[in-house]
Amino acid sequence: MPNTYTQIYIHAVFAVKNRVSLLDNSWRERLYEYMGGVIREHGHSAIAIGGVADHVHILLGLRPAQTISNIMQNIKGSSSSWINRERLTNGKFEWQSGYGAFSYAQSQIPIVTRYIANQEKHHEKRSFIEEYKQNLRDFGIDYEEQFIFHSVN
């Protein structure tokens, strides 16, 4: 649309189904590159992508032509299909339903980028769930404990 100018930065977080540590170091970077391609294919900017074996963080510049839920569906659906097509895991790979999405100002982008790049180090001190709940609290997001990314026993 002419004369429409936006600057929307979204930090998205999502987990492997049942929070199983399936994202192996040997192919994780290829996954991030693939996800970046999906993001760019839909006209958005992939600013930072990282994570650990059981979850992913993405910082993207979102164009308003697509909703957050639609781009997340595209990223998760395409990447799980890619993982299965490449046979990178034993059995069928799936992402857990849902995601967290947090907005940031341009001045915060370097901080969020460093945070995403240092996920391995962050999770030496704090679990994914502890960190995720803290993000929800920091952003004033009410949540129901039963819907947080729990492992299935």
Image (cartoon, rainbow, N blue to C red):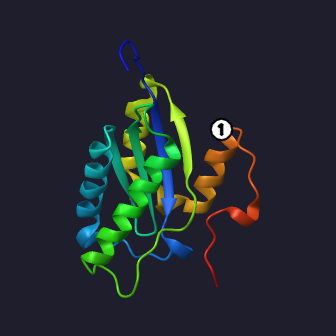
Q: Position of residue 66 (x, y in %)?
A: 44, 39
Q: Quadrant of the C terminus?
A: bottom right
Q: Position of residue 58 (x, y in %)?
A: 41, 48
Q: Amino acid at mark 1?
A: Phe
Q: Measured along the vertical axis of the image, is residue 52 above or below residue 86?
A: above
Residue in front for this viewpoint, 125 or 130: 130
Which residue is nearer to you in this view: 57 or 37? 37
Point out the image quarter for the N terminus. top left
Query: Image check: 21 left or right of 37?
Result: right
Give the residue at x 29% y 69%: 82
Secondary structure under tag 1 reads loop
Q: Position of residue 28 (x, y in %)?
A: 29, 65
At 42% from the left edge and 24% from the top edge, which residue is drawn? 7
Place residue 129 in its image quadrant: bottom right
Residue sticking out furthest to the front? 1
- The residue that label 1 is drawn on is 139
In the displayed structure image, the side of residue 64 where residue 33 appears, left or right? left
**Neighbours of disc 1 within 10 Å: few (<14), some (14-19), many (20+):** few
Is 146 in front, or is 53? 146
Q: Is residue 88 above or below residue 144?
A: below
Task: From the top left corner, tell me how far across and down residue 119 is, in percent.
Answer: 41, 55
Answer above or below: position of 60 versus 92: above
Q: How many marks?
A: 1
Going by the image, does 40 lie left or right of 69?
Answer: left
Q: Residue furthest top?
A: 3
